[in-house]
Image (cartoon, helix red, strand yellow):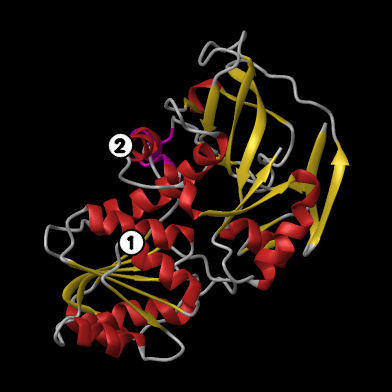
């Protein structure tokens, strides 16, 4: 079978690899759609994220959906069922898993993260209980996008947005755009978004942002204070993956406000002014992937409350995966989410 394997920074090769055999509790899934995440781009650009390095050839892709081919040894969805694949395989036995926090399991295996291959291959053998049958009318690309929606849901859960709160989303990639939409659905009285890309800010307004600002043309902190009459926002959700944006979020929230950091900085560091955070009593939370949110994500899409297909702007066949990564690396205008069709 064909697979896209990462050998090092900007070194992706299409290769033939053995087709996996499902083990106990696993189903064989034919991957049909993989959406490309910012963390995939980090691996492509740098060969790793922080201390996680791709020392061996790695199949990327953790946002994926496919069709069950064989589940005889596992039960679960029947062959022919289109499913979203939860990329996280926590141990389900440690104190953190048992406390309901599998997203921080120290033994977790995660698709597309060393040493676990991801979905950019024709078939995967995956735990059957981590496969979620898609609702009627959902295609594979929508199924793949349930994962970033789940990440945004988890971030909003951490933010604890209250009715009539004001919310700023700093960084409007796909997760930031979904955070804008979820903040609006959560009853925020004001939703504001900042970015350096005007094309994404236009989409943010379509997702429900009341106002947007180009972070290159205006001071985001001063702009957010003006939007709130000098008070600051109740919640700031950082989705840029840029160290100084966390500092902007800390400065932009009101006394007692909450900052949720979602982005992954390329240099594995963030910095912010301690005095501002301390004097305002800011609550700072770092968001790690998601918990058990697939069914909630699917319910939002099925109810028409979140439009995932509108965020998929580019589609490529597996053979063009290197071209897709190059487009993301360049930051091509209009590119919000790229999906690889297998």
The crowding category of the residue bearing disc 2, from other C-alpha atoms within 10 Å (few below 14, some 14 to 19, many at least 20), is few
- The number of numbered badges drawn on the structure is 2
Asked whether the residues under the numbered discs 1 and 2 touch, taking CB atoms below 8 Å apart as contact, a structural biologist would say no
Q: In front: 272, or 319? A: 319
Q: With 200 as the anchor, is 24 left or right in this view? A: right
Q: Where does residue 329 sit, x and y in percent of width and height?
A: 68, 68
Task: Report the quarter where the C terminus lies.
Answer: top right
Q: Residue at x 40, y 61 (%)?
A: 177
The crowding category of the residue bearing disc 1, from other C-alpha atoms within 10 Å (few below 14, some 14 to 19, many at least 20), is many
Q: Where does residue 299 sit, x and y in percent of width and height?
A: 33, 34
Q: In front: 264, or 277? A: 264
Q: Where does residue 113 sit, x and y in percent of width and height?
A: 64, 48
Residue 21 circle label: none
Q: What element carries label 2?
A: loop
Q: Is residue 21 above or below residue 198?
A: above
Where is mark 2, residue-wise?
A: 303
Magenta stretch, residue numbers: 94-102
Q: In this view, does 89 lie above or below 25?
A: below
Q: Quadrant location of residue 95?
A: top left
Q: Say which label, 1 or 2, has the lower sequence index.
A: 1
Does residue 97 show up magenta in the picture?
A: yes
Task: Report the quarter where the N terminus lies.
Answer: top right
């Amino acid at each position: 079978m064909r697979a896209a394997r990462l050998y090092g920074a900007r070194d992706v090769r299409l290769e033939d690899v053995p087709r996996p055999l499902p083990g106990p509790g696993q189903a064989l899934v034919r991957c049909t759609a993989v959406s490309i995440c910012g963390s995939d781009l980090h691996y492509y650009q740098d060969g790793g994220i922080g201390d996680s390095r791709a020392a061996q050839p790695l199949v990327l892709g953790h946002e994926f959906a496919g069709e069950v081919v064989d589940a005889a040894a596992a039960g679960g969805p029947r062959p022919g069922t289109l499913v979203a694949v939860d990329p996280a395989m926590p141990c389900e036995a440690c104190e953190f898993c048992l406390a309901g926090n599998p997203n921080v399991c120290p033994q977790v295996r995660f698709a597309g993260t060393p040493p676990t291959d991801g979905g950019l291959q024709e078939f995967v053998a995956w735990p059957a209980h981590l496969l979620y049958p898609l609702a009627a009318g959902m295609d594979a690309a929508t199924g793949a996008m349930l994962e970033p929606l789940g990440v945004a849901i988890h971030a909003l859960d951490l933010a604890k947005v209250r009715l009539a709160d004001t919310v700023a989303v700093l960084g409007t990639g796909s997760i930031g755009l979904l955070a804008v939409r979820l903040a609006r659905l959560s009853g925020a009285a004001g939703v504001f978004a900042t970015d350096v890309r005007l094309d994404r800010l236009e989409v943010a307004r379509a997702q429900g942002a009341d106002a947007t600002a180009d972070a290159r043309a205006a001071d985001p902190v001063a702009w957010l204070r003006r939007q709130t009459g000098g008070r600051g926002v109740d919640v700031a959700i950082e989705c840029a993956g840029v160290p100084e944006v966390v500092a902007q979020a800390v400065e932009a929230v009101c006394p007692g406000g909450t900052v949720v950091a979602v982005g992954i900085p390329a240099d594995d560091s963030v910095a912010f002014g301690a005095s501002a955070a301390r004097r305002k009593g800011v609550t700072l939370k770092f968001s790690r992937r998601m918990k058990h949110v697939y069914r909630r994500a699917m319910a939002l899409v099925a109810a028409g409350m979140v439009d995932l297909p509108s965020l998929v702007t580019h589609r490529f066949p597996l053979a063009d995966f290197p071209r897709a990564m190059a487009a993301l690396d360049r930051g091509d205008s209009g590119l919000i989410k790229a999906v690889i069709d297998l």
